[in-house]
Image (cartoon, rainbow, N blue to C red):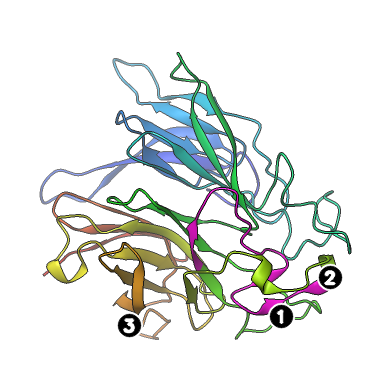
Amino acid sequence: MGGWDAGHGRLLALTRKPGQPFQVDVLLTGLNRPHAIRRDAQGRILLAEAHQISRVELPAAGRPARLHPLITGLPQQGRHPLKTFVIDADGTLWLNQGAPSDHCEAFDGVAAGDAQGCGQTGGTAPWAAVWRYSPRAGTADAWEGHAYAWGLRNSMGLAVHPDSGQLWQAENSRDALADGSYAPDTPPDELNRVEAGRHYGWPHCTGTDVLDTSFGARSCADYAAPAKLIPPHAAPLGMLFYGPAAPAAWRGALVMAWHGYQPGGHRLMAWHFDARHQPTGEAQPLISGWAAQPGRHPMGAPVDLDQDAQGRLWITEDRNGTLLVLVPR
């Protein structure tokens, strides 16, 4: 990313020969707060910047790497400009468009909500929403989309269940409460099963019962309830369903990076799913105790993760700028 100002991001390639350290090559510079990188259904590399999603053409035959924009004009003002996305088996791209504010207050030129509602979500082009995109008929590099579900403050964790095709979302819930105060022990973050046309509560209801009546809401029963609650300010980011190469004890589990510096964060957690493809029990730790320990290690802040054919988990961590690998035993 290179910082929160636009134009400082880079795309890097890491290569390694057996027994040698990684070689780092810079493929692209001047990027606008890049965050997510994924392969599409055809194996092409897609990259998210704050304002667009592009296909990456890797360098070849002396030609430098290039970007081919697929989705452009994405909103990038406010508190949550980063884009993350996931692509399902059908090639559909599910994209986060985070809220421009914490709790629908006026911010960065966006008007505050009022007793009639919060204009920052809902309508024809909402923030605080998950959008569904697919290639326009007859083209490969022109995509179109629409809002799929809203009331989702910042969907930095997205994953598609490999068997059911169901979209799951990890919600970074609001920081300040209805009176504007900050509390480290509330409100909770959320794990949501995302369904078409549903409103998941932001900014009116967080968790199951943290109600804010400032924008006309009267009951949390009016909004889709989370499937599971996540500790307050855990700040869930990247997540994936652990595939067939995973250790048997974790196969099929939803693995999540909890990025936050508050007590519930800085760890890697996993939820087991049952035969109905629903999360069961409580989240279990894959990595915990990642708080700073003098003389041993600094605090960790996991951001995103991927898995390889050997069942290893590759984890990016931004507090210390590290790439880590979790090796099953």
Which one is in front in this view, the residue at disc 3 or the one at disc 1?
Answer: 1
Which one is in front in this view, the residue at disc 2 or the one at disc 1?
Answer: 2
Hey, which quadrant is residue 171 in on the image? Answer: bottom right
Q: Nearer the viewer, residue 124 or 82?
A: 124
In the rendered image, residue 218, in percent from the top left (x then y), is placed at 78, 73
150 left or right of 182 in image: left
User: Given contact means CB atoms under 8 Å apart, are the residues at marks 3 and 1 in contact?
Assistant: no
In the rendered image, residue 11, in percent from the top left (x then y), is placed at 43, 39
Q: How many marks?
A: 3
Q: Which residue is mark 1?
A: 182
Q: Is residue 318 visible?
A: no
Mark 2–mark 1 Cα distance, whole angstroms, equals 17 Å
> Residue flagged by tag 2: what amino acid is it?
Ser
The mark nearer the N terminus, 2 or 1, is 1
178 left or right of 246 in image: right
Mark 3–mark 1 Cα distance, whole angstroms, equals 31 Å
Q: Which residue is mark 2?
A: 214
> Residue flagged by tag 3: what amino acid is it?
Arg
Mark 2–mark 3 Cα distance, whole angstroms, equals 47 Å
Callout 2 secondary element: helix
Callout 1 secondary element: loop
Answer few, some or many: residues within 10 Å of disc 3's Cα (few below 14, many 20 plus, some between 14 and 19): few
Q: Magenta segment: does it hold 171? A: no
309 left or right of 12 in image: left
> Residue flagged by tag 1: what amino acid is it?
Tyr
What residue is rendered at 50% in x and 55% in y?
194
What residue is rendered at 76% in x and 74% in y?
212
Q: Which residues are magenta?
A: 191-213
Circle number at residue 296: 3
Quadrant that contains the C terminus: bottom left
Vertical position of residue 277 compared to residue 14: above or below: below
